[in-house]
Amino acid sequence: MSIPHLFHLLLFCATQTLGVRIQSDSVVGSEGVIQIELEGTVSLLCLSDGDSEPDEGLVWLRNGAMVRLMEENKKNVSRVCVTPAIQEDNGATFTCHLSSNASDSDSVTLNVTYPPPIMGSEELVVEEESVLVLQCDILANPQVSSVVWTVNGSTVDLLAGGFTLTDDGVTSQLIANSVDKSLHAASYGCLANSPLYGEFNKTFQVTVTDKVMKFPLMPIIAGVVVVCLTAILAVVSRWRKIRQCCK
Ligand SMILES: *[C@@H]1O[C@H](CO)[C@@H](O)[C@H](O)[C@H]1NC(C)=O
Ligand SMILES: *[C@@H]1O[C@H](CO)[C@@H](O)[C@H](O)[C@H]1NC(C)=O
Ligand SMILES: *[C@@H]1O[C@H](CO)[C@@H](O)[C@H](O)[C@H]1NC(C)=O
Ligand SMILES: *[C@@H]1O[C@H](CO)[C@@H](O)[C@H](O)[C@H]1NC(C)=O
Ligand SMILES: *[C@@H]1O[C@H](CO)[C@@H](O)[C@H](O)[C@H]1NC(C)=O
């Protein structure tokens, strides 16, 4: 064996026998990423390697915060379990190190995948000239690759239908600022495509009713005030006359 080879081998052994390493029953991808489904379970095992002290204490951190461990789960090997995985666990980093030396550590990061919560159908009744808002929640991991809105089965023509579309990665909204029965009474659909989970859709049945005359409250209040003032003035002037004739 050549000298450089031997050197590499020694270096390899050295890095293998120092410190701690994390094992998992899940596949640990490149750069220590573990992919799991929402509500799934991931079990992580931390082993202190080789020539560390007997009964070496181990510490787990989740995003830098200490994880509480049972006393018997701190020596030589330590196991933590994430179950069920929630959306907030996405991107969480679990780090294990010796309690005596924090610079000797190993980490894994969770990639919690979930589909967009798009399903079912909704019925909406809107008044003519009011605002129509159709909303689809599209938050997913990985992000949906496309969101398409349809009206009566064909792709919405934003300009012709007087619609605006907003999409912030969390919700997609199709908005009509002034509802027109001939233009907007229809069956709508929101179709999203997830690169991991496939197609999702939600339908909206929109019924448009005639504009109801709003009770004209302000003119009525104004009228009532005028009538009252007139009555008071009438009484006051009458009172003067009465007092005058009584003198
Ligand atoms: C930890 O390992 C040492 C030797 O490697 C052993 O003597 C000790 O019993 C182990 N402790 C536990 C709690 O397994
Ligand atoms: C902690 O671990 C690092 C990396 O293995 C090592 O260089 C350092 O000497 C250790 N420190 C102590 C106090 O053992
Ligand atoms: C998480 O996993 C999904 C599905 O494999 C992948 O598309 C995405 O890029 C991953 N995200 C990260 C941050 O690794
Ligand atoms: C959608 O279809 C319904 C029922 O066939 C029809 O009454 C309505 O005018 C259509 N709307 C649009 C915008 O095409
Ligand atoms: C919408 O989803 C349902 C199941 O949720 C499916 O049966 C239907 O074919 C889908 N429609 C479209 C247009 O993709």
Image: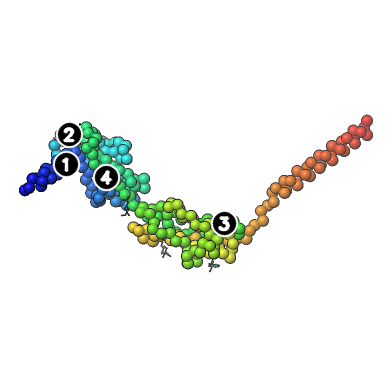
* Labels 1 and 4 touching (C-beta < 8 A): no
Q: Nearer the viewer, mark 4 or mark 2?
A: 4
Could you tell which of marks 3 and 1 lies nearer the N-terminus?
1
Measured in 3D between alpha carbons, the distance from the residue under mark 4 to the one under mark 2, in whole angstroms, is 24 Å
Q: Residue at x 50, y 66 (%)?
A: 152
Q: Residue at x 90, y 33 (%)?
A: 243
Question: Does residue 180 appear in this view?
Answer: yes
Find disc 2 in the rendering and name its residue.
Answer: 55
Q: Which amino acid does the dot numbered 2 rest on?
A: Asp
**Label placed on residue 108:** 4
Q: Is mark 2 within 8 Å of ligand 1?
A: yes
In 3D space, how far apart are the residues under numbered discs 2 and 1 (Cα atoms)?
21 Å
Mark closer to the chain start, 2 or 3? 2
Residue occupied by mark 1: 15
In the rendered structure, are the residues bearing label 2 and label 1 in contact, judged by CB atoms less than 8 Å apart?
no
Q: Position of residue 118 (x, y in %)?
A: 42, 57
Q: Secondary structure at mark 4?
A: strand
**Earlier sequence position, callout 4 versus callout 3:** 4
Q: Amino acid at mark 1?
A: Thr
**Label 4 – label 3 distance at C-alpha:** 48 Å
Q: CA distance from mark 2 to mark 3?
A: 69 Å
The residue that label 3 is drawn on is 177
Q: Which mark is residue 105?
A: none
Q: Position of residue 74 (x, y in %)?
A: 22, 36
Q: Residue at x 34, y 52 (%)?
A: 113
State whether residue 185 appears in this view: no
Residue 195 image-quadrant placement: bottom left
Query: Would residue 179 appear left or right of 137 to someone viewing this image?
Result: right
Residue 127 appears left or right of 232:
left
